[in-house]
Image: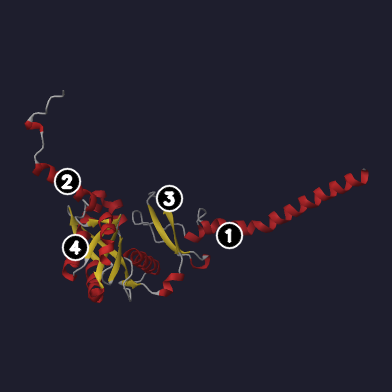
Amino acid sequence: MAEAAPLGSLQSIPDITATIELLARLAYVDERTGLENRNALKQEMQSFAESPHAVMFVDLAGFKEINDRHSHEAGDAALRHVGSVLLTLAREQGAKAYRYGGDEFVAVVPTARADDFAGAAIAALTAMTFTFETHALTVGATLGFCVPSAPEHIDLLIKRAEKACAVGKYEGVGGVTRWAPALQSIELASNRKRSDACKATTTVVHRVEAASLQTPRACGSCGLAFTPASEAPDTCTARAARRLRELPRRLRRAARAAAAAFSERAIGVDEG
């Protein structure tokens, strides 16, 4: 028979309870910002279906430059600052704020307070200055907002708000870009671009149509311009254009090969 464990080695009920609470916190709370995370948002989605809610999608502007120029610790400080701003704003407006992932955040707002929240968000998130060590740093945000006319599933509202945010970022729109049905037809794609000088990378968002590809901004780390997306040799659009240019030559070559094969076969028939 196995010996019983000494009483001193057994965890007490309060210790076990504290451990369970800590594990739950780690699963549903973002450790950098103190906001609830994406897991918590998924858990709470059903509860939002009971009444109409709007969704704001927040994508930080200038965050990568802070990481590149000042260190990832400075980037973490930026995330904490934005998280604090969003948490305060959400409490004031009766909303919930979440860190969605990376430098993206989501706020779920009762539709009755949607306009007030949007106005307060513009004022609070357009340009945020915080102190890291001895540096005064600024981080901004691109905002997408989806206000439904009837209760909609939060997951759908998030996708629409994210699309509105991406369109606003592409077009350089200030403030909040609101979702509208016309945005549904806009297709956006992104390509990773690298500066040859410092090797820093950024994601360039552009419309899929070749005629409206956006020229990416300069590298935030070294100041040199990135290669325009329409000229980048590794983009899907560039590859498709190259194949179209090569198509006539390939067709001519295939026609010559077919004609030669036919001639050889005809000669063989005659000889036979």
Return the residue at label 4.
87
Q: Mark 1 vs mark 2: give the one in front.
A: 2
Pointer 2 local density, CA inside 10 Å: few below 14, some 14–19, many at least 20 = few
Q: Residue at x 47, y 59 (%)?
A: 229
Q: Are marks 4 and 3 in contact (CB under 8 Å)?
A: no
Measure the C-alpha gap from mark 1 to mark 2.
57 Å
Q: Are marks 1 and 2 in contact (CB under 8 Å)?
A: no
Measure the C-alpha gap from mark 2 to mark 3.
49 Å
Three-letter code, disc 1:
Ala
Residue nearer the viewer, 111 or 134: 111
Q: Mark 3 vs mark 1: give the one in front.
A: 1
Q: Residue at x 90, y 46 (%)?
A: 269
Question: Is 265 rendered above or below residue 212?
Answer: above
Q: Residue furthest right?
A: 271
Return the residue at label 3.
196
Three-letter code, disc 4:
Leu
Residue 122, image quadrant: bottom left
Q: Residue at x 45, y 69 (%)?
A: 186
x then y, percent, for residue 109: 24, 69
165 to the left or right of 260: left
Measure the C-alpha gap from mark 4 to mark 3.
39 Å
Q: Earlier in the sequence, mark 4 or mark 3?
A: 4
Q: Earlier in the sequence, mark 4 or mark 1?
A: 4
x then y, percent, for residue 50: 26, 69
Return the residue at label 2.
20
Three-letter code, disc 3:
Asp
Return the residue at label 1.
241
Pointer 1 local density, CA inside 10 Å: few below 14, some 14–19, many at least 20 = few
Question: Is 178 rendered above or below residue 261?
Answer: below
Residue 105, image quadrant: bottom left
Q: Are marks 2 and 3 in contact (CB under 8 Å)?
A: no
